[in-house]
Image: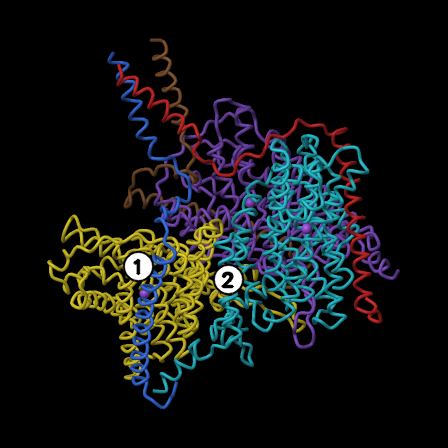
Chain colours: A red, B brown, C blue, D purple, E cyan, F yellow
Amino acid sequence: MANGESLIAQGVDLMIYGMGTVFVFLTLLVLAVTLLSAAVRRWLPEPVPAPPAPRQVDTPPVDAHLRAIIQAAIDQHRNR
Amino acid sequence: MANGESLIAQGVDLMIYGMGTVFVFLTLLVLAVTLLSAAVRRWLPEPVPAPPAPRQVDTPPVDAHLRAIIQAAIDQHRNR
Amino acid sequence: MANGESLIAQGVDLMIYGMGTVFVFLTLLVLAVTLLSAAVRRWLPEPVPAPPAPRQVDTPPVDAHLRAIIQAAIDQHRNR
Amino acid sequence: MEKLAILWQQSGLAQMELGPAAMMTVGLILLYLAIRRGFEPLLLVPIGIGTVLVNLPGAGFEAAPVYDAQGHLQSPGGLLYYIYEAGIATGLFPLIIFMGVGAMTDFGPMLANPKTLLLGAAAQVGIFTTLLGAVAMGEFGWLDFSLRDAASIGIIGGADGPTAIFVTSILSPELLGAVAVAAYSYMALVPIIQPPIMRLLTTPAERRIVMQQLRPVSRVEKILFPLLLLVLVGLLLPSAAPLLGMFCFGNLMRECGVVNRLSDTTQNALINVVTIFLGLGVGSKMSAEKFLNWETLGILGLGAFAFCLGTAAGVLMAKLMNRLSATPINPLIGSAGVSAVPMAARVSNKLGLEADPHNFLLMHAMGPNVAGVIGSAVAAGVMLAMIG
Amino acid sequence: MEKLAILWQQSGLAQMELGPAAMMTVGLILLYLAIRRGFEPLLLVPIGIGTVLVNLPGAGFEAAPVYDAQGHLQSPGGLLYYIYEAGIATGLFPLIIFMGVGAMTDFGPMLANPKTLLLGAAAQVGIFTTLLGAVAMGEFGWLDFSLRDAASIGIIGGADGPTAIFVTSILSPELLGAVAVAAYSYMALVPIIQPPIMRLLTTPAERRIVMQQLRPVSRVEKILFPLLLLVLVGLLLPSAAPLLGMFCFGNLMRECGVVNRLSDTTQNALINVVTIFLGLGVGSKMSAEKFLNWETLGILGLGAFAFCLGTAAGVLMAKLMNRLSATPINPLIGSAGVSAVPMAARVSNKLGLEADPHNFLLMHAMGPNVAGVIGSAVAAGVMLAMIG
Amino acid sequence: MEKLAILWQQSGLAQMELGPAAMMTVGLILLYLAIRRGFEPLLLVPIGIGTVLVNLPGAGFEAAPVYDAQGHLQSPGGLLYYIYEAGIATGLFPLIIFMGVGAMTDFGPMLANPKTLLLGAAAQVGIFTTLLGAVAMGEFGWLDFSLRDAASIGIIGGADGPTAIFVTSILSPELLGAVAVAAYSYMALVPIIQPPIMRLLTTPAERRIVMQQLRPVSRVEKILFPLLLLVLVGLLLPSAAPLLGMFCFGNLMRECGVVNRLSDTTQNALINVVTIFLGLGVGSKMSAEKFLNWETLGILGLGAFAFCLGTAAGVLMAKLMNRLSATPINPLIGSAGVSAVPMAARVSNKLGLEADPHNFLLMHAMGPNVAGVIGSAVAAGVMLAMIG
Ligand code: NA
Ligand code: NA
Ligand code: NA
């Protein structure tokens, strides 16, 4: 950029144009997203997606549960 | 390859030699594989391999089965 | 290193200084580690850590155990 | 105000031209086909994005790095430049993918019935007749195709992505985008392209032919096969050795049973990473001047032609073999010889079940299917040997 | 005996100087902060080790390779030299990380309440006021900062590691170490830096504001958003396209649902590997002459200043929006606009629960949080366009 | 017909010579040893395949790329050329592997009984006496070994693959194939080589010595050890810092507990990928002129000699320490000092159980076992410092 100006002046410019661009861009994005959502709900309605499946398959909590049940069962036998 | 010939001529050559090579190669492969299998069954007989183990260890189906059994057990208790 | 010497002489040098360095270094390491452990136990005592968790979550051994218990339970029912 | 001018001049809108705009649309269409229509998404999603990125005016994704006189880096190159130069111009990515494909391939069905290798050979007719068609167009001056271009176009008929990319990146890099897109699109269209041809060329009776149960194949055979193939290729057609060598290496890792951790990584993390970058790199060649021309239309047309011919040749070869040999072969598995693993085999199975609900051809079709991979790699080798 | 001399002269003790010794201490301090204090360990552990390694006298981790006149390799370069040249000087590593971050980002909350994008914009005030502070220091000759340096320092306020590294490696590589360390340290300090500012600028009543339940967002919206963002960036600010392009690519792989294996690898093996090498490469720039000077202190001070300003700007913007719009916005989510995903959002949630134990702000804060990532990437783009 | 001639001239059969044919056989033998006999398959399978590939006549796996005068790529290089130049000539692959090994190493047993470090020192005697043997052969003109060659050969006795490859690729690359093959083969043969020596040098009574239960080691010690080792190496022997630095980095990632996702990837995807390419790269140096000569026989002989000496030295050192210290040491764990992790430790345990079925030495042997890794890295450092 023009090197005649002082460093400060260049910094001020950068700040003005920078923040300006950021706000303009994100404001446009707000509009675009709003239009997008409206368009999608209008023309491509869809059942709400289920949350993505968990990546690694862990042992299900039921095991702990199971163990409890068995324990109960065994006890009942014992106590008979 | 010789650039005197027409493009067509070169294409025809390529087709002839290409398909030729493909057939010759795969025919040889048929023979080689047949010999290989014969040799293996003759000199290195082996019990048929089990299908390769599944890559990630998921929770085995037995769990579902287990749950059923327990349920039955529990019910019997209740119904007593 | 000085190329005047015979290959043998250079090899001998390398052996002497090499083994020397190895022993010196590892002896220092013994001392350092001993001091480290002493310092840690003196100033940073800590409950012994649990062994690191297994990387992939396999089905826990308990399943086999479980199955046995169930089997027992079932049998008892049958034999009643 | 000249700051605003700078920002404006650097904006994409100011630099936008018709060509890049059209190509970005092409990229979005590829994404639509991949995501909505399920066209080979693993490749076409990265290719589509790469197409969009490389055509963003002023984004410099394919810019080469700039060095000053002393050789110091002045401005770094673009991401897609580095990906293409490091992975595609060198041939590394297709070869690594081929290693992964090898590690995912089970040669059991083919080993149980080796004659099916011939079906994989016949299906390669598509490659070479298409080549002939392309040189004809070149000769008559309809389209600007050299012999090298024609070979790259023909290989589309191999229905094997990495092979097509490997050959094209060597013989005619400027066609890479069109060839790769055609190859993957038609592989995705196999379930639509093949059935009519298969029905046309077979009688209901033939489609009902029941094939012999495949014998079990021992582990030793599966371990020795990749080595056998590797040595055979080395002895007869070294120009096919890079592709088939890596393919055999991957398959050996899979079958030998002592390096499972290497085999797993090859089939997962490694092939996934390379697939992403391969797709982006191919996309980086999707520029307007290279893609938006009559040659591309010619390539797409010839590619479809190649797929149809290969399918027909495979089916007819199966019928011929039925004449010559005692053991029956259901001609529906011939079409699987074009590879396009595993879609083509599934198509054979589907049409088989239509003809006879109890006749499962999937395993029988896997033989010619994997044979087709070998066949097109061999065809690639011949082309590289005679032209490259 | 001259052998002993050789060994001694080559030993680190003989070559040790004050600078490297101090920098090794800095490296160990970074490791302490990462391991004991939990400061962004994924980055600061590799950075800390890299700092120690590159400052080991005579270890040659950053040595360039030496070639003879014929161009044959005489002595190979050091590990960190290769990592830096291949991955950071080229910009590849930050871009690949950004792709992974995109694959881990859920834009759902932001799409459900797009207005929160403006909070992500406001928080970038920190970047540019800090830039101004830095140029002031330069102008008055207090510290030796050029405009390029000032931009690199300002971007710390973006609270986004890869963005800061990408910009700094282009604009002023010699500051890379200090800038990266400041960025990641302050991101780790968000839970300490932000709350007082947030309390200062909000009334208890405002902190208790309950926000409307977020509407469910359909998969189609989630798939189309990254494409929309990508095209918008391309048209308006191509200099931000490398960062946001890869970000959108990663997010598309996540949402499109047809390339889950690529998405998984991008989020795990690939980003982990690149994180390790990115950290080591950044550490390789932590040399005494570049780090142990007043400029670094200035950078650390200005960085903190940037974080505080960004936090405040986000909160105030939220209050302003409350004035202008009907739908209530809890100002506590404004601070999440600095990104620092997901810490900043957690902080908003925590303060919200303090004010009202039944008021969960986490999901609402994720909107500005991801918006902040976009905001700082846009800010980076402007700087690269106007200075780079 | 000249087309047929072209194909024939390019075929492997036409170009086959005795050397490559013999080397392909060597490659197949390595594969046999790896797959059937379980010789270090993770390395010997890729090395074996690499050996076959690089010796396929006309396949051009090790061809260098060709550029025209303008520096445009005319023909790309071969896969193995790129792998070797990028990963082995630079030293990157061995260092990354070492990082992974560090992430897989538990220093607990060694920290509980630090004296066992001395056993790891003693076992390195094998390295240097072998070096002496090699220079002797060179001096007497029996074989053509320089001092650099001798050092590379000696390092085989370190029983540590990456260390041997790292040193050899710097000191005498042309020996890389033979040295790597010898190192990995003998590591696989440890269960056959060591027991007789161990029995010869110990009395049944000594083999029955029961060692004190190891004390538990706290997490803090495990975290601080790699840092301590790293600093010590840096101060005393920087030339060993690349190897041990990456080793310590990997171990720190493992123990610090805050970067588990990095540690996991280092131990799995990353080390697996690098192992594949390291093996292929080593194989690419297995050419007839470099491997089929008397020097290779000398290397194999000297390598075995080195393993035996190292084993003996470890055992004798243990007996000496028994004399000097009160706490008993079972001399069987001395042999584990050659590293070859974890085979050597298992061998110690096996012989211990033979002598006393209730005497489990495995944990006690892990100490010298990991000490041996450090010991050979230090030995490598000395050689690089005095010769390199
Ligand atoms: Na094919
Ligand atoms: Na931000
Ligand atoms: Na060792």
Task: Tell me which chain the residue with mark 1 is part of.
Answer: F
Is residue C45 rendered to the left or right of residue E243? left
The residue located at (81%, 48%) in the rendering is A24
Task: State which mark lies toward you, 1 or 2.
Answer: 2
- Mark 1 on the same chain as mark 2: no
Instruction: From the top left corner, tell me how far across and down residue F281 is, in percent.
Output: 45, 63
The numbered mark at residue E29 is: 2
Given the current orientation, which residue lies at the most extreme bottom position? C4
Give the quarter of the image for residue C41. Answer: bottom left
Type of the residue with mark 1 = Met
Residue D138 appearing in the image: no
Label 2: state its secondary structure: helix
Nearest the camera: C79 or E305? Answer: E305
Is residue F131 rendered to the left or right of residue E60? left
The residue located at (75%, 45%) in the rendering is E316
Q: Which quadrant contains ligand 3?
A: bottom left
CA distance separating discs 1 and 2: 26 Å
Nearest the camera: F97 or A15? Answer: A15
Instruction: From the top left corner, tell me how far across and down residue D147 is, in percent.
Output: 66, 57
Residue F1 appearing in the image: yes
The numbered mark at residue E78 is: none
Is residue A21 rendered to the left or right of residue D183? right
Label 1 beta carbon within 8 A of ligand 3: no
Give the quarter of the image for residue E370. Answer: top right
